[in-house]
């Protein structure tokens, strides 16, 4: 063994495996495995892209002032309580690094987003997965699992990969019941898919222990750009900014994200299409004997009889050029997570699952 050893916990982290984007031997592939926006990026953002090449020799602004002002303006928030990161993943990482370490506990629902245990181990804290009830977050179980060592509770709402959601009163009850000094991180990656939802912003403003995270990766169709943001009490923002690299976002990232957030017409269009096609897809699969919980996000969690059937279906879909996501790693081995594609994508996956159920293998 080398005497040069990493920090405790780091070797327990399994390398992240992303959604596949190609199938060998199939050219016409539809990728429904990473909750990406099937309509892509808006034309407004593409136009902004053309202008960004000019000042690439200059270091970017370190305070993200223009982007924060745009976000604050569009959402009616306080720009001083916003922090921007390389995806919301980086903001989640700032919270973990600043507030948890060796000997601490980080709590999250059992089917929670795969980054939560990775972040816990990254900072040397113990990841604590809490049982859910029928794939829905159980606030009482989370509160019961909290101890004096609990520093952070991560909650994606809507949740990934279940697609289920808990109400604002339940989230407030969770925040109010946490041990002293613990932070609730309300991960709002799918906020925009829920019409009229503030993603937890009001909860942040009314309390000192809630952080909200948001992303440009999903409804804005900018997963490749890597921009997310957080909204938190001023004291927490001041702490997170101390560990943020000053030049974490390039001018390209900032100006495209700013153009995107100002283009709410695109968000509305994508939400409307998603809502319509999600209902269609869920019903089409239910009629084929593949139920799913009512989803509030841009994917559905299709439930099969058992793990064997789910895996056989995934294998069959691949032969048809359709890529979906297995969820065994999320404790849901009998399920497949299917992103709501555009109309053609939804019809194609429903048709193929129908063929699979009819015995094609
Ligand atoms: C997709 C997703 C994110 C977004 O990550 P980015 O780093 O912003 O791309 C965060 N949380 C959950 C639950 C997600 O599904």
Image (tube, rainbow, N blue to C red):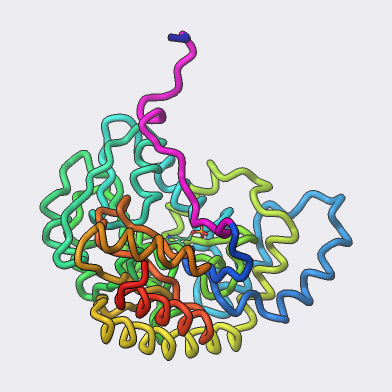
5 inside magenta stretch: yes
Image quadrant holding the N terminus, namely top left
Would residue 202 be seen by someone viewing this image from the given angle? no
Examine the rendered structure and indicate whether residue 89 appears above or below residue 196.
above
At 28% across and 82% down in the image, what residue appears?
288
At 69% across and 75% down in the image, what residue appears?
259
Q: Position of residue 336 (x, y in %)?
A: 34, 65
Q: Main secondary structure of the magenta part?
A: loop
Magenta region: which residues? 3-24
Asked whether 109 or 180 is in front, the reply is: 109
Q: Position of residue 50 (x, y in %)?
A: 83, 70
At 43% across and 40% down in the image, what residue appears?
97
Examine the rendered structure and indicate whether residue 326 appears above or below residue 197.
above
Examine the rendered structure and indicate whether residue 10 appears above or below residue 159.
above
Image quadrant holding the C terminus, namely bottom left
Does residue 341 appear to the left or right of 130 in the view shown?
right
Does residue 159 appear to the left or right of 221 in the view shown?
left
Examine the rendered structure and indicate whether residue 285 appears above or below residue 123.
below
Q: Position of residue 246 (x, y in %)?
A: 65, 46
Q: Position of residue 57 (x, y in %)?
A: 87, 50
243 inside magenta stretch: no
Asked whether 23 or 185 is in front, the reply is: 23
């Amino acid at each position: 063994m080398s005497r040069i050893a990493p920090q405790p916990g780091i070797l327990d982290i399994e390398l992240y495996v992303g959604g596949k984007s190609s199938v060998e031997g199939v050219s016409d592939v539809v990728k429904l495995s990473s909750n990406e926006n099937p309509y892509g990026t808006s034309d407004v953002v593409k136009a902004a892209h053309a202008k960004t090449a000019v000042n690439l020799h200059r270091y970017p602004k370190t305070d993200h002032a223009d982007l924060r002002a745009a976000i604050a303006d569009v959402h009616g928030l306080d720009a001083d309580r916003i922090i921007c990161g390389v995806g919301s993943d980086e903001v989640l990482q700032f919270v973990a690094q600043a507030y948890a370490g060796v000997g601490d506990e980080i709590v999250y629902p059992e089917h929670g987003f795969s980054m939560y245990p990775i972040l816990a181990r990254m900072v040397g804290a113990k990841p604590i997965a809490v049982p859910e009830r029928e794939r829905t977050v159980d606030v009482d179980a989370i509160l019961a699992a909290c101890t004096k060592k609990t520093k952070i509770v991560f909650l994606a709402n809507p949740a990934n990969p279940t697609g289920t959601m808990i109400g604002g009163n339940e989230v407030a009850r969770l925040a109010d019941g946490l041990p002293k000094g613990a932070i609730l991180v309300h991960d709002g990656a799918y906020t925009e898919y829920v019409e009229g939802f503030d993603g937890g912003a009001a909860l942040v403003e009314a309390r000192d222990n809630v952080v909200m995270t948001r992303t440009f990766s999903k409804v804005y169709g900018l997963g490749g750009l890597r921009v997310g943001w957080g909204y938190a009490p001023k004291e927490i923002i001041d702490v997170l900014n101390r560990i943020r690299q000053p030049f974490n976002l390039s001018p390209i990232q900032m100006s495209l994200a700013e153009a995107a957030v100002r283009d709410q017409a695109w968000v509305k269009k994508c939400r409307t299409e998603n809502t319509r096609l999600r209902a269609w897809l869920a019903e089409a699969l239910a009629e084929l004997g593949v139920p799913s919980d009512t989803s509030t996000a841009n994917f559905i969690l299709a439930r099969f009889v058992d793990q064997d059937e789910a895996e056989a279906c995934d294998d069959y879909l691949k032969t048809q050029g359709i890529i979906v996501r297995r969820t065994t790693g999320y404790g849901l081995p009998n399920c497949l997570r299917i992103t709501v594609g555009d109309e053609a994508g939804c019809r194609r996956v429903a048709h193929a699952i129908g063929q699979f159920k009819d015995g094609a293998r």
